[in-house]
Image: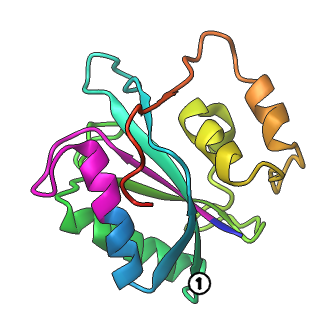
Amino acid sequence: MILIALGSNLMSSAGAPAEILAAALAALRTNEIEPVKVSRFYLSKAWPDPGDPPFVNAVAQVVTTFAPRALLGTLHAIEQQFGRTRDRRNAPRTLDLDILDYQGRVEAGPPVLPHPRMESRAFVLLPLEEIAPDWRHPVSGKHIRELIAQLPPEIERPQPLPIPNPSG
């Protein structure tokens, strides 16, 4: 199973963040990355500065023939098509695409697999549980529900958007 996180909190020529995620899913398809399951879209506060615009996040299970490094390169190229710049860490962005898990591989990277900070991010874990309820972390072996239960109470849980996911 190959899992990708999607996020956006800035407008682009594709529209508002939810529209950007829908367009990014279409861009994956035209780049030989086929989403086979996509979570609902979730709204979450920006981090580390909650004063930044809120994020729209989702997780997709995809099928591709790309190896991890080539997949990461293609994801970065798609981000650039949507106006992503990388001037500052954790800055607001038009599109963020991250490989969360690539068939259970554990690799030092690039890319680092599994994603090194995913188990502390509610905006990743909740959409991931929605599409892969039996998923286990490749390093710790912890079930997705265990990881969610271990999130500190001060970490705010993202909320599903009240509109249907436009990606289908």
Provide residue 126's location: percent of width, then percent of height: 63, 37
| Residue drawn at point x = 34 percent, y = 20 percent | 49
Residue occupying the far bottom of the picture: 65
Residue occupying the far top of the picture: 154
| Residue drawn at point x = 61 percent, y = 67 percent | 109
Q: Taking 2 as reference, is 66 left or right? A: left
Helix or strand or loop: what does disc 1 sit on?
A: loop
What amino acid does circle 1 point to? Ala
Residue occupying the far left of the picture: 13
Find out whether residue 143 is within the magenta segment.
no
| Residue drawn at point x = 66 percent, y = 53 percent | 131
Provide residue 154's location: percent of width, then percent of height: 60, 10
| Residue drawn at point x = 59 percent, y = 34 percent | 121
Q: Is residue 34 above or below residue 114?
A: below
The residue stretch that appears in magenta? 3-23
Q: Taking 24 as reference, is 148 left or right? A: right
Q: Quadrant of the C terminus?
A: bottom left
Question: In terms of depth relative to the viewer, which is nearer, 58 or 89?
Answer: 58
